[in-house]
Amino acid sequence: MSVIYPKITTSFLKLASACLTIPEAPTIVGAGKRAEAVSYLKKKGYKKALIITSPSIVRYGFTDVITEGLKAQGMDYIITTEVAPDPTFAIAQSIRKKGMEAGVDCIIAIGGGSVLDCSKLVAASLVSKYRSVESFAGLLRVFKKPMEMIAIPSTAGTGSESTFIAVISNSETHQKKTMVSPKIVPDLAILDGEMLTKMPAKFAASTGMDALSHAVESYISTFNRRKTHDKHAPMAIKAIFENLYTSFCEQDNVEVKNKMLLASYYAGISMNNEMVGYAHAFAHQLGGVYGVPHGEAIGITLPQVLEYNRKSAEKKMAKLAVYCGLGTQDMPADKLADAFIAKVKDLRDSMGLPAKCDKLKEEDYDMIIANAFKETSVRYPVAKFMTKQDARDFLNAIKG
């Protein structure tokens, strides 16, 4: 594939993105703050809530304070735990049908990225009852304001509580489709550190690396929105450097969990405005072809992508290194960039995440490269485009 093609398509992407106004979801932050979802909805006059969550969230009792609060306020609700990892249009359609039959007028989504993404689709489809749920997939295909939705994330990684993107799978082909619209940004994000206290350490590590990649890749992209570029991404990166390892080690440290949730939220906003890059494009292939969990795949690809971008994004990485206290402004830019890349690697290694992909096979290289290039060419304004040989070298470097 020629490098000219993605340069042209991403130029159009940047032009189109510059015309979008992407709202930032208001936030409530703090341990136990999920209970405030009830007063928020009551104050706005809503009568019946659709709670979309997962079986584990209910099992841990995280929904109790909300359901009890709704009862105390005289509000009705229904609850569904149908959403599984990689949610499908069929699941969204089933939840939509239940919501319509029950006459709900608002949504409380409590869970990880899969729950929040599915809830965004349900929220959009409930106010457009004559359209199929599949019709909302694609770019800017949500025409009405979705049903009021509160997002309460249970992971500090996807940033779905702040993004204008939702990923849904086709039930039969398992092909993932993306719904993209500023209208689907949740109306309120409640960042409650208690929600993360049941998360296994390995999962805290991998989701944290995903959040880090959102912030880092968006920062080194070539699309620099003045309003967000020097604000959200650096704040997210610094917070993750300072808190992820502690979050990994201390399951019950709610204060640190709150900080990680806020970092993930900021990284999501940064990704909204400046997108990601090759770390995600190749991580998606490691996940799709070999079943490598996304956060682990990111831990493998992100440091190598930074090595590839060492020259093209050196000044930006140097700036991040200074901001994060890894060096001083009087140090050479290349040394600061080295320190930043080393910090990313050290953080990954300290939590025992893999540095290589043992499943990667050379006979799959052409397919992986073609798919990664296709994803990059239509989505990501990367700092430096790869040639096919660059991509083969990249895969050799991450091959176990």
Image (cartoon, helix red, strand yellow):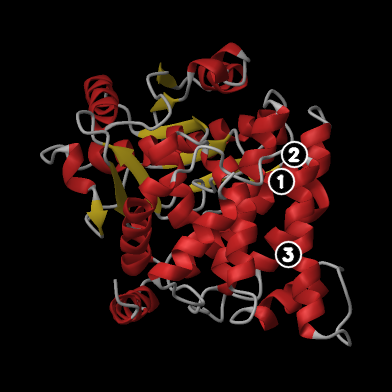
* Left/right of residue 182 with respect to residue 333 in the rendered view: left
* Left/right of residue 260 with respect to residue 153 in the rendered view: right
Q: CA distance from mark 3 to mark 1?
A: 20 Å
Residue 241 is drawn in which quadrant? Answer: bottom right
CB under 8 Å between callouts 3 and 1? no
- Against 199, residue 11 (above or below) is below
Q: Nearer the viewer, residue 306 or 117?
A: 306
CB under 8 Å between callouts 2 and 3? no
* Left/right of residue 137 with respect to residue 70 in the rendered view: left
Residue type at tag 2: Lys
Residue drawn at x 67%, y 50% is 262
Q: Which mark is residue 257?
A: 2
Residue type at tag 3: Ile
**Where does residue 204 sit, x and y in percent of width and height?**
68, 35
Q: Nearer the viewer, residue 188 or 380?
A: 380
Q: Which mark is residue 260?
A: 1
Is residue 276 visible from the viewing direction of this image? no
Q: Earlier in the sequence, mark 2 or mark 3?
A: 2
Q: CA distance from mark 2 to mark 3?
A: 24 Å
Residue 291 is drawn in which quadrant? Answer: top left
**Where does residue 393 sit, x and y in percent of width and height?**
51, 63
Residue lying furthest top in this view?
Answer: 59
Residue drawn at x 48%, y 78% is 223
Where's the C terminus, which quadrant?
A: top right
| Residue at mark 3 | 341
Q: Earlier in the sequence, mark 3 or mark 1?
A: 1
Circle 3 sits in a helix, a strand or a loop, which is it? helix
CB under 8 Å between callouts 2 and 1? yes
